Structure formats: C-alpha cells, structure tokens
Amino acid sequence: MIKALIFGCLLLLSSCSNLIAQTIPNMRDGVVYLRKGDLMKDEVVTVKLAWSNAWIADSQEDHVFLQAPNGDLLKTVKVNSATKNNSAIFKLNEPGDYRVEVAGASFRNFTLSTHSALPMVFEPAKIHKSIALPRSGRMFFSVRAHQQASFSAKRYGNLSDFTLSSVTDDRRYQLKLKKHRHYWEHDTAVIPQSIRDEIYQVSWSGDGKVSFWLDGVPNLFSTKKSGLFEPHLSEGKASIQITDTIVGPVPSVGAAFPFVNPPEVTWPAIRSWNVEAANYYFFADDLKDNKHRDIAFLETYEQQLGIRKSNSILANTGRDSVLKPTKDHRSLIIDYLESRHKRGLLNDNYVAFADEPNLNYSSYDEFETYFGYLAAAIKNSDNPYVAQTKLAVPQSSRFLQGPTRDGAADRKGIVWAEKLIQQYGQWIDGISWHEWLVRDLIDTPRYHEAVVQANLLARKYQDRLGKDPALIIGQTNVSSGASLSPYEQETFFAALWWTSVVIQSSQAGKLDQIMWFKAADDPIYKKGMIRVNAKGVEHKPVSHAMHFITENMLPWVLEIKNKHPELDMLATLSKDKKRVSLLGVNKGKRAIKMNAVLPFLEGKIKLSKVTGLNEQGETDLSLRLTRLDEGNRQLGGLIPQETLFSVTLTVQSQ
C-alpha cells in the first residue's frame, strides 16, 4: 500500500514538474547526476535545461551533454548566437544514473530543473567559476565516518563567506573568502573526522559567481538532504570502425619553448618527449641589440633536441603584443630574417607578425595595416633569404570562438583569417591559432571541428592562396594566461586532456603542428610539462603522456568512426604499411568495453604490443584479436577508467 502511494505521488510529480521542482541554478562549469530509480522505471522523467547570457555570449558557442547510465551520448545542446530558443528538454527513459555536463568555460548561465522526487547531485568544477548562487539558499553534502574532508571556495564577486553546519549536532564552520593575488589561490575549511556518517548544510552570504568544492570525499552537493547519492557509472561499450583509407599525415607534436637556450639539465626530459616542433617568441626590441640572439638556442633545438619544424611569434619583451608599422621596425625584421635564413637553422619555420592580434589590437583594421605593411616588404623583397619567409595568420586567440574580451563577436579567429586571406592570400603560407578554455574532457571534439573548419577555409580560397597552407595550433592548454588550476595542471587530468586533444586534432589528417604551452613552468605560468627546481627536473603527468603519445604515432592517419564520448582513438599507419598503431584514451570515470573493427590487410596480423598508462604508471591491458566472418579483424577488450592505451599491430607477409 505504501509503495503504491509513493508511486502515485511520483506520477503526480512527474505530471506536475513545473509546479513542484528542484533546481540547480546558473551553472557555468560542472556536472549534474540524476538518478532514476526502479519506482519510476515505467515513466519518462522530464528534465528542463534553461539558459541566459552571462558575458560575451554572442561570440561563443556553449555545449551541454546528456549521457545515459552506460555513458552513451543521448543529446548535445549547442547554444550560440543563432540559437532561437532559451531552453531544452531532456527525457530520462531507462533506470540508472544519468550525467549532464555543462562544459566549461561557458559564457552563459545554465539552470537545470526537475521534480523534487528525483535524486540530483551537483559536482562543481574546482577553482574555476562553476555557478552563480542566489542571495538565499542552501545545499548539502555528506562525509562518511572516518573520512577527512575539506571544503574550499574561491571568490569571484559579492559572495563573501560560507557556513557549514552539521545537521546532527551544533558543529559549525565558517569560511571567509578573501581576494587573492593569484588565480589558483583559494580558501579552505578542514572538517574534522567523525566516528559516524555526517551530513552538512552549506549556506552563504551574498550572491553571484563563485567556486566551491570538496576534497577527500566525493565532490557532490544536493539541494536536499534526501537527494544525496554517489553515482554508479555503468560499464560503457564503444564500437569503433577503422578503415584502410588514409586521410592525411599526422601532425608534428611539440611544445612552446623560451627565447633562450634551455638549461642542459632539461635536455633529457625534452628528448624523452620525441617532439618534432617548437613554438617560440622572438622579440623585436631584444633583436635591436643582437640580431644573432637566437643562434645558440636554434642550434640546440635542431641539433640536440631533434626539432624539425617551428612557428615563431614576433613581439616585444614585457608582453607588449601591439607592434607598429614603422620603417625602423620593418628594417629590423628584414635584417633579422636574412641573417636567420642564411644560417639555415630550422628552415621549416612559420612566422606570425603578432601574438593573438584579435585579442590585443584595437581593431582588425589596425592589425591589417600592420600586417600588410610588413608582409609586402618581406614577400616582395629582392633578397631570396627574406622572400622565402613563410607567414602564418592570424595567430589568434581561439579560432571558432571569440577571444575573452568585450566586443569579441567581431574578433573570431576564423573571421580574421578569412579577411586576411581575401586581401593577402598570395603571401600567406599557414593558418595558425591558439586554442584555450576547452576545459572538459567530453568537449575536446572542438579541436577536431576547428581543424576541419580551417581546412574548409583553405579549400574555399585555394586559388587565392595558390597552395595548401599549413594548419597550425601554435599554442594550447586547458586554460589561457595565468587562469590555472593545479587540479588540472598538476594531475593526471592534464595527461588525459592532452592525449584526447592530440587525438581529436589529428583525426582529420589536415593539421601540420600542435604545441602544448608550455615546456616548463615559470614563476607566473605554472603550466609546463616539467618544473625545474633545486632538486633538478620534475616531470608532471602530462610529460609522461607526451612521451606516450609521440611513441605511438605513425606517419599516416587512417579514417576512424567512433561515437563514444569518453573514449578517443587515433589509428595511424607506417610508411611501408606493415604496422598499424592505435593510440587511445579512456578519459571517463567508467571502464569501457571496446570493440574495434580493423581494415582487411593482406597477410597475417600479429598483436605485437599493448601498453597502458594511468595515474599509477604503466598498467597491463588484456586485449584480444579475432577474425570476423568477412575477413576483417576485431580487437576487443576492457579499457579501464582514466587510462591511456596503445596497440601495435604488425602485418606479416604470407
């Protein structure tokens, strides 16, 4: 009888969800888990997603993902300036724990609402702003017996303090939010261990943007005590099709290096990455005193570290990125280029005349005047050492999205690239950009889309360009500038992210270079793959991932079809077509059963090598190669959560 009453209430709530609802408001970066229990298994549960603009939304496309209990992607909501409505409906059919991710960084406020009977927990992003809270409200979190937990928060606006109150006794903890100098700094309240399970209520003073999170326990909050639960992520299934179609070459993978000779103590680390390309700045005001300033380190790059390609960015020291079209500047750069090319060092180099001009210049017209003035002098030079200079544009901050500044709608990298090609296509040798703020692993297909769109742009103006321009992601990282989170940069998350980004960027077979920014930490930008200190060189997890990536990429990219949002794979082929390498990453928090159908290759295929890498180091994987009825081979097995993996297949002649 009681069960029937509960079920009837649930039906009533389902039909009246607009009247009785629970809401997580104004999310900017985070995940919501929703549990559809057995009592509701015969009902379709409705969840409403609504959004409103926060900042520069007209220049940005935001993504929200709905995943089934087994991780399959049920729906992707893409919101941009052309989107007419301001809401979407999700329907939960099967029982289980669903996952809704608001991918950061987002530029809109997203609100998720459903009826109050549905358990719902929020997992906020750490450090980065994750939500805008109303002036009054409360949330709850749980701490199991004998667990050591801490509650942290970072101030972004008017919200100034949190109060944590135990619901079982009178214990209270106050956390005042300070304004810190560095982005990654925050405030923390340590919660003493308890001999019993505890639930805490979170309340706050003020309203607005904020970040808050838990360490030591699951980072989960609910608007109701009864809504708290730990999600169960069911095993996923990924069916992958690999064909024998070669779509193009793999890109040269590299890193951003300083305009100095790297310390010799770092050379073994750099060599371990097997990088083929480098990004670096060269400084006009520095070259005034010595136009041979870069001889020593270019020789090191090429002769000691095996770097073959580069893309260099012209700037002034002191982060002065706005250069002027003066005769003195033009003469200086021409003299430098002549000297550099005569030495024959790193000849496969692309030069950008400014760093992220769509972010830093006052307008397109200002930059276009500067670019045209310098490009004409270089490309029309009678000196072949100068005229051979390869130019890349626009070296923008982001490509399909606008930069993070007001007025960004008129500053998208792809728009500036098209305008420059229309005016100066005959002088342009490469399309280059920097990519930032794709912070969530599920959203890395943005990199693939950027490469595809850049390639379409090049094809559109093929006659104007007179060549196939190189496509170059000159710098990329999870975050731009100093907006860094140690939860990303210092952990295995960066290894998962970088592997996924390289795979997504490479799949189209159209990219020439991609660079992690940067090679080593400096005092301000702690986003290197290594750090150098008194003890020597310390490798971060992403450093080990770089070695893993480059070790498992062959020259040619094979076409691949894969729909699973948490498993990425790149298939590459050796020049002699005797080896196939599969580089993959399970970037999710669930194990995934993978079945990859391989192209029919003449001869006997041997499973030569299987390697895995996770947070603890190298790990064993059990994968099996079988033959299908039609002659193709199938590679199958279980890929553990948050694991990089590689498979080498050797074709033996019959």
Image (cartoon, rainbow, N blue to C red):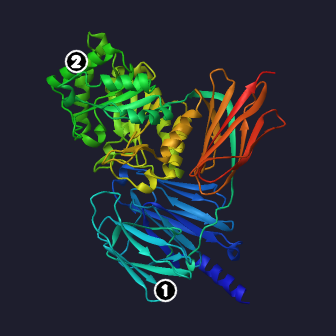
Q: Is residue 11 visible?
A: yes
The disc label shown at residue 335, or none: 2
In the rendered structure, which disc, 1 or 2, sits on the residue that comes first in sequence?
1
Give the mark count: 2
Q: Which mark is residue 167?
A: 1
Quarter of the figure with the C terminus: top right
Task: Assign the N terminus to one quadrant of the image.
Answer: bottom right
Could you say whether the residue bearing mark 1 is in a helix, strand or loop?
loop
The residues bearing labels 1 and 2 have C-alpha atoms spaced at a distance of 73 Å
Q: Nearer the viewer, residue 399 or 328?
A: 328
Q: Quadrant of residue 330?
A: top left
Residue nearest the viewer, comparing 202 with 80 = 202
Query: Can you see residue 460?
Result: no
User: Which image quarter: residue 231?
Assistant: bottom right
**Numbered disc 2: secondary structure:** helix
Up the image or down, 338 lies above or below 482; here it is above
Q: Residue at x 51, y 39 (%)?
A: 546
On the image, the x and y values in percent for residue 163 come to 38, 79
How crowded is the residue under tag 2: few (<14 C-alpha within 10 Å), some, or many (20+)? some
Q: Position of residue 68 (x, y in %)?
A: 64, 60
**With 642 as the anchor, is 386 left or right in this view?**
left
The three-letter amino acid code for the residue at tag 2 is Asp
Q: Is residue 516 above or below residue 227?
A: above
Which residue is at the far front?
A: 535
Q: Is residue 197 above or below residue 405?
A: below
Q: Is residue 60 left or right of residue 583?
A: left
